[in-house]
Amino acid sequence: MNEIKATSNQLLAKAVSFHQNNEFIDARKLYKQCLSIDPNNFDCLYFLGLLYAQTGEFQKAVNSLSKASELNPNHPATFSTLGFAQLELKEYLPAIDSFRRTIKLQPNLVDAHYNLGNALQDTHHHLEAIASYDAALQLQKNNPNIYFNKANSLRYLKDFEAAIQAYDQALFIEPNFAEAYCNKAGCLEQIGAYEEAITACKQALSIDPNFATAHWNLAFCYLLLGDFENGWKEHEWRWVSPDLPIHQERRNFDQPLWLGQESLFNKTIFLYAEQGLGDTLQFSRFAIQVKRLGAKVILEVQKPLVSLLSSLTGVDQIISKGEAAPAFDYQCPLMSLPLALRAYSKEAMNISSPYLHTSKESLSKWESILGKKTKPRVGIVWSGNPDHHNDWNRSIPLDQLLQLSSSKYQLVSVQKNISAADRTLLEAHPEVLRFDNDLHDFSDTAALCELLDLVITVDTSVAHVAGSLGKETWLLLPKNPDWRWLLNRADTDWYPNTRIYRQKELLNWAPVIDQVKNDLNTAFSV
């Protein structure tokens, strides 16, 4: 037994020496030889697990370190390294447990507090994550990464001012921290400091000129401020980074991308939707200009939009996303068309209004569904896609919007997806007509909107349906609006018949609702 122990210790000593000199292949062989003769050698299991973690073999690291932790439950480095490997495998709950056990054994280990914060952040426990980052900062005040991740959690909690301060602390320590400048820019946008956000984006790009997310943020700042020429150029960076959500929509074609250089006369171009339904409705207008260049235009859109967009002038063929496309010479995503067409002016954006139309069949169907009209009809839409990253900001609680109810006019829900809580609320308001089960695609939505006297909506696809039909629309916007609505305007060049109502304070819809109610009473006064 003593000979086996002595041999394993000799192998371990040699393995550790190789390990310390970064000769990982030789170290690994010796660790395994050691364990073949002494399977419960704690030190060997720990060091082999550490090696696996260092070489990115995280599942093997977890296997080795888990066994080591059973043999010695009082070794903090084992649990710290185990937690790191679990975190890399996105095994968040086991990682949290490992880091907490590390801290219990060794409270002053900075990495354990920092990585615990990271695991908590990844599981959206942001208040607890901030507490862990603060504990790490008590032990190490000059670590920019800790400030950066703390700022990220503050940003998720919508505490933008505090997040900006934390990003600034990271940048004070590490002035070349491009990601900190980029994320700071996002917070500056949220508080309306757009020029400062542009400066922060440019600082990030001075450090890393190919930082796609910084270009993406810069694009939206430019667009929001009405600088369409620079905005559309920067917007092309959306395809570069796999970290951006739009990247998954990237398409690979043999045919070249058309951005306005080549003649389209007698050529076929394939235009395709790339983002949300509202984006498709808004940017499909540019197919009209493409057609005027002498092209045959094939348009691919999301299936619920096919019927409605078939009314678009200038489209030779419309197909649903996923269908096989016919032969074509060039291709272009819809949201690259403003750049390709140099559509930087009000005139270029408007094209013509309306540019979409409802069919006689759809109108007849919805006239029958609505029944006899006894008073003006006002459509309402209060929420968008709950999975949208900005839905917390743009949607209005239904109980607030229902304050618009009046005997002077009839409220009609144009909301397709209604939550269980909102259904219950609507049951208590039978005066509101509801047709969500009858809205099968956007031809139905368009026909319903066409038959209303007015549409009141938050920033969602219905705003674009009504706008593209030339319907009178009142659009309710948050304090920090989407770029397309610009700033400080009660109108929009995209849809001439749309009136905008804007929040003055973040998440405070009450004054907006009051103003809308006053204007409704004036508009429909007897």
Image: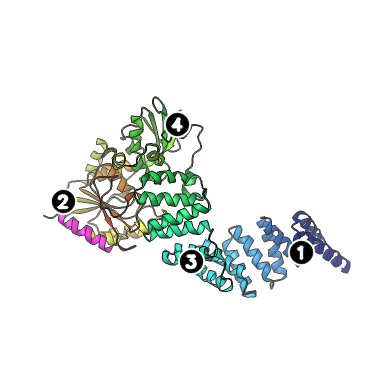
Instruction: Judge depth for marks 3 and 4 and give the one in front.
Output: 3
Q: Earlier in the sequence, mark 3 or mark 4?
A: 3
Secondary structure character of the magenta stretch overall: helix
Q: Which mark is residue 330?
A: 4
Where does the C terminus fall, quadrant-wise? bottom left
Residue 166 is tagged as 3
Quadrant location of residue 90?
A: bottom right
Q: Is residue 428 visible?
A: no
| CB-based contact (under 8 Å), mark 1 and mark 4 | no
Can residue 178 be seen here? The reply is: yes
Task: Left or right? Give the position of 416 relative to 241.
Answer: left
- Looking at the rendered structure, the kind of residue marked 1 is Cys
Magenta stretch in the rendered image: 509-526
Using the image, determine if residue 417 lies above or below residue 99: above
Residue 156 coordinates in the image, percent (x, y): 45, 62
Secondary element type, mark 3: helix
> The residue tagged with tag 1: helix, strand or loop?
helix
Front tag of 3 and 2: 3
Quadrant in which the N terminus appears: bottom right
Query: Measured from the top left, where is residue 120 in percent x and y?
Result: 53, 65
Q: Nearer the viewer, mark 2 or mark 4?
A: 4
Residue under label 2, please give it: 375
519 is within the stretch colored magenta: yes
Q: Earlier in the sequence, mark 2 or mark 1?
A: 1
Q: Which residue is mark 1?
A: 44
Spot occupied by residue 373 in the image (x, y as percentages of width and height): 17, 47
- The residue lying furthest to the right in this view is 3
